[in-house]
Image (spheres, helix red, strand yellow):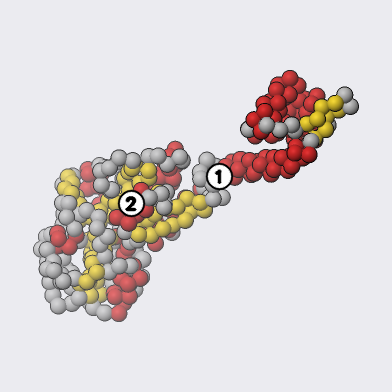
Amino acid sequence: MTLTQLRYVLAVIDHGGFGRAAEHCHVTQPTMSAQIKKLEEGLNVLLFERTGAGVHVTPIGQQIVQFARGMIEQAQAIKSVARGSGGLPAGSVRLGVVTSAAPALLTTAIQAVRKKFEGVKIDVHEGSPTDLIAQLKNYEIDLIIGSIPAEEPGLRWLPLFWEPYIVASNGFDTTQGTSQYPSLENRAPRYLLDEGAPVEIFANGGTTNLGVGLSDHLAWKSGGAGNVTSIATLAALLSSSECAVVAPFTATLMIAESGVSRKRLGSPNIGRTLGFVWRTSYPWTPRCYEIYDTVHANLPNGVVALQKFDPTRIATDLKEARLN
């Protein structure tokens, strides 16, 4: 049973005979008759009673026709939704974003995606890099803006931007310290907003991926720093007490409290790379590249945009990153 066969049956009924129905459907009458006969044989019923006076629908045919009309209407609705989606999944795209970068990206890149792909709902899901990758592999989300996933088949990753880690402080002297990072070894509380992305160092046109956590690189003693889990908590700490918080640059963009200073962590510069991830089996992969281009063209100010993993460009563009 096919939709074409059902359309032919409805055409015969609506136009009162095979001849006018075939003309309406732009096929020959023998072709239409053969398809309807094939449908009857497949269902093992007679849909029409053919007499010299014309064609009449059988009782069983009348029941089947009711369902056939509903099926044709549903098929038309599916086509309409697909056309309106611009080639994207009907309804929505589920976009995962690492928590620390989500607020900054929502007001820039994700807003631009929503404007470009009107009619498609962009559902944003926050999470840690590990959780987002797990959700992507479990088909719970469709795309990710996050850190580089582990090497495994079935995932596509394109670089978006590099950003430094920042020491945001209130009443905390970060002007002193070693060449590696500002002094954080006094009695004021220290906090870390770290989502587990690998620490990277860019200096002298080269790159070194240390492959360790940020706190490991800082050599903080166990228990020497508290964990910050959200930007709201980060802002509240900085506005209510003397402390220092190490966080990705995009997270510190959302801090507006007066008296809060920011300084890049380390010289050479310590940071992370975020990119665009999706499953290679995703049916709308060609559109993913369009979304990627839109995100890349509308990144937050101050990050280092990457067309490809190019350490030389990073070392140059870091000089232009805007920090308070």
Q: Is residue 176 left or right of residue 115?
A: left
As drawn, the residue found furthest toward the bottom would be: 240
Identify the residue shown where x is 80% and y is 24%.
19
Q: Is residue 219 visible?
A: yes
Decide: is 171 above or below 198.
Answer: below
Q: Secondary structure at mark 2?
A: helix
Residue 88: x %, y % from top left = 51, 43
As drawn, the residue found furthest toward the right would be: 53
C-alpha separation, residue under disc 1 versus residue under disc 2: 26 Å
Quarter holding the N terminus? top right
The disc label shown at residue 133, or none: 2
Q: Is residue 34 left or right of residue 140?
A: right
Mark 1, residue position? 85
Q: Secondary structure at mark 1?
A: loop
Nearest the eye: 114 or 49: 49
Decide: is 180 above or below 279.
Answer: below
Decide: is 43 above or below 162.
Answer: above
Q: Is residue 83 left or right of residue 277?
A: right
Identify the residue shown where x is 29% and y is 75%.
237
Q: Quadrant of residue 25?
A: top right
Q: Amino acid at mark 2?
A: Ile
Label 1 environment density (alpha carbons within 10 Å; few <14, some 14–19, many ≥20): some
Identify the residue shown where x is 70% and y is 22%.
34
